[in-house]
Image: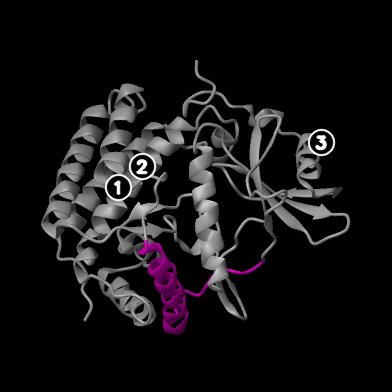
Amino acid sequence: MDPTADDAPHPFSLLEPGRILDALQAAGWRGDGRMLALNSYENRVYQIWIEDGPTVVAKFYRPGRWSDAQILEEHRFTAELAALEIPVVAPLAAAGTTLHDHEGFRFAVYPRRGGRAPELDDPDTLAWIGRFVGRIHALGAIAPFEHRPTLDVESFGREPRAWLLEHDAVPPELLPAWRAAADQCLDAVTAAFERVGATRTLRLHGDCHAGNVLWTDDGPHFVDFDDARNGPAVQDLWMLLSGTPEEMQRQMVDVLDGYRDFMPFDRRELQLIEPLRTLRLLHYSAWLARRWTDPAFPAAFPWFGTPRYWQDRILELREQLAAMSEPAIDVP
């Protein structure tokens, strides 16, 4: 079995405190022995206190997920954003690089930035976030990522569906219903993308939900560009919305009120919100299944893979199918 394959065991179990501190010291940060594991499943992330300097956050990358070129491309993007005084948390450089390697573990070190969840029911907060997403996209529109992937129906929908089927992830008694719902949804998603037609592709944050936007008295700052990729602008906007279609429409008006100060928005992309949500749901199920050999996943998601889980996913996909048949939200 390939130890770097998505569904293979990986060496995170070897990432014990001594090795973490040795890795940081080799890169130029000498810890004082205190560390705190932060909430992260895809990678391993630790807050580490430094003897003669400010506290840092170290992110150890999941083996086999990204190439060095893809990681460094993300780092360059955040560095470009930070140089424009856009509030992102970019990795720190040491010995001329932001990507370090120690005993086979690749990692990056970040300054510690605190914050709280943004109040997404506040119009001013949404507009403020929208302005900074607009600035991120203004830079992201200059040139696409060369090494990082593009969000599309194939990579976020068809491929995850195929993986789940090939690996018998869905219980046999629920497989026909799940496969029918997934196939109908993918047909609807494909039709929506075809109906909208070609849209501008940008470098994106890629996972711009409220958990990756930390709020301070000075406003928002954006963290965790680990899922950065090429895609349509609306991908970085729709995850800020919640509630009924009417509520989401009002929220999008507020977000775009700030966004359009720095970046034009193609209103056709509003028709992609529910299709993109559907792709995320399919991708999420496959993500959980691919990571199941990581001991952190069964502990954190004990409900995954149960008949109840897949029954809920079938219902969810059917609800998405209905949502995609309704008129999309619209804004002036």
Secondary-structure class at tag 1: helix
Which amino acid, mark 2? Answer: His
Label 1: which residue?
279
Amino acid type, label 1? Leu
Residue 258 drawn in magenta: no
Name the residue beneath numbered marker 3.
18
Q: Is residue 280 visible?
A: yes
Q: Is residue 310 above or below residue 225?
A: above
Report the Cα–Cα distance between label 1 and label 2: 6 Å
Task: Look at 58% across and 42% down and name the residue there.
Answer: 43
Q: Cβ–Cβ below 8 Å for labels 3 and 2?
A: no
User: What sort of colour scheme is used for the picture?
Assistant: one colour
The reply to whether dot 1 and dot 2 touch (C-beta < 8 Å) is yes
Main SS category, magenta section: helix
Q: 46 above or below 325?
A: above
* Tags 1 and 3 touching, CB below 8 Å: no
User: In the rendered view, does 332 fall on the left or right side of 125?
Assistant: left
Residue 138 colored magenta?
yes
The residues tagged by marks 1 and 3 sit, at their Cα atoms, a distance apart of 40 Å
Secondary-structure class at tag 2: helix
Nearest-to-viewer mark from 1 and 3: 3
Of pointers 1 and 3, the one earlier in the residue sequence: 3
Residue 283's tag is 2
The image shows residue 247 at horizontal and vertical percentages of 31, 74
> In which quadrant is the C terminus drawn?
bottom left
The vertical placement of 194 against 10, above or below, is below
**Relative to the observer, which residue lies in front, 280 or 58?**
58
